[in-house]
Image: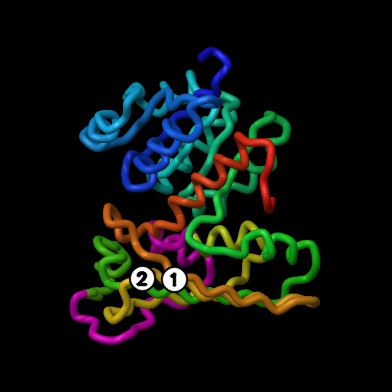
Amino acid sequence: MNNKIKIGIVGCGAIGSEVSIFIEKELKDKAILWGVCDKDIKKAENLVSRLKTPPRICEIDGLLKNVDLIIECASIEAANYLLTRTLIFKKDLIILSVGALIGAKKILEKIEKYNVKIYVPSGAICGVDGIGALSLGKIKKITLVSSKPPTGFAQNKYLEKNNIDVTNIKKETTIFKGNVKQAIKCFPQNINVAATLSLASLYSNIDVYIKINPKIKRNIHFITVQSDTTRLTVSVENIPSKINPKTSNLAILSVKYLLKKIFFSFCVGS
């Protein structure tokens, strides 16, 4: 038990719950889920009740003091806080609210000095390895078109501010066109894909289009990358999580796969 890596999870929703179960079942010989944290205590209690070896429920700093690896799957606000604290406590961090990293250049420059690792799973898209490889050359243009059913935009403040009622939209409608920083500001819970693309490609001038389509039941992402050597296109159609329609099942699986790469000796892809 003493030699096992202690893991803490911040956010006990769809992703946090599934990842917790994965850790208990698949990583039991290598790691232990030491504790969980959520601003909604009922979510944390519900998760703990589902596990055979119940972890502690504690505050974020309690996790940081006692674990070796933190998995953030809560919000950009939680990710921002963890980014500043993980250097102080010198703990490794997996971030799912990837938008927090776009404005964290100074922190990312320090992680080598502090001997801290920050991991970003591929999330709801594929082809991140290839896009990262293309960043070593010259990328000329990247376009992202994300389409989701209306349920994927529930309680979005940008839509509320602009009096856009998603229930009244009857056909595919573009509700946003802009760059990555603008997209993150307007759709913090929907645009991790754009942030991941920007970080992997080292290309900030991505054209982002966000659409609502009441005729689809999947979250669809279409990516085109044009470099000096390659034209890459990626199309992904994800079934939304039943627990949280804003989250794709692939995003949950990507965290599990990242953990396998961290904890096991053999891995495919970077």
Along the polypeptide, which appears first: circle 2 or circle 1? 2
Which of 25/33 is in front?
25
Q: Residue at x 24, y 74 (%)?
A: 166
Considering only vertical position in the picture, is 132 above or below 2?
A: below
The answer to which image quadrant residue 229 occupies is: bottom right
Residue at the bottom extreme of this rendering: 171
Q: Position of residue 72 (x, y in %)?
A: 45, 40
Residue at the top extreme of this rendering: 2
Per the rendered image, the range of residues in magenta is 167-192
Q: Residue at x 29, y 81 (%)?
A: 215
Q: Is residue 236 left or right of residue 152?
A: right
Residue 178 visible in the displayed image: no
* Residue 181 lies in the magenta-colored region: yes
Q: Position of residue 211 (x, y in %)?
A: 38, 77
Which of 177/119 is in front?
119
Looking at the rendered structure, the kind of residue marked 2 is Arg
Considering only vertical position in the picture, is 214 above or below 62?
A: below
Q: Is residue 192 left or right of residue 149?
A: right
Q: Residue at x 32, y 35 (%)?
A: 38
Looking at the rendered structure, the kind of residue marked 1 is Glu
CB-based contact (under 8 Å), mark 2 and mark 1: yes
Q: Position of residue 120 (x, y in %)?
A: 57, 48
Q: Position of residue 265 (x, y in %)?
A: 68, 36
Label 1 SS: strand
Label 2 SS: loop
Q: Which residue is mark 1?
A: 237
Q: Residue at x 43, y 51 (%)?
A: 252
Q: Residues within 10 Å of mark 1 (few under 14, many from 20)?
A: some
Q: Which mark is on residue 218?
A: 2
Residue 37 visible in the displayed image: yes
Label 2 and label 1: CA atoms lie apart by 6 Å
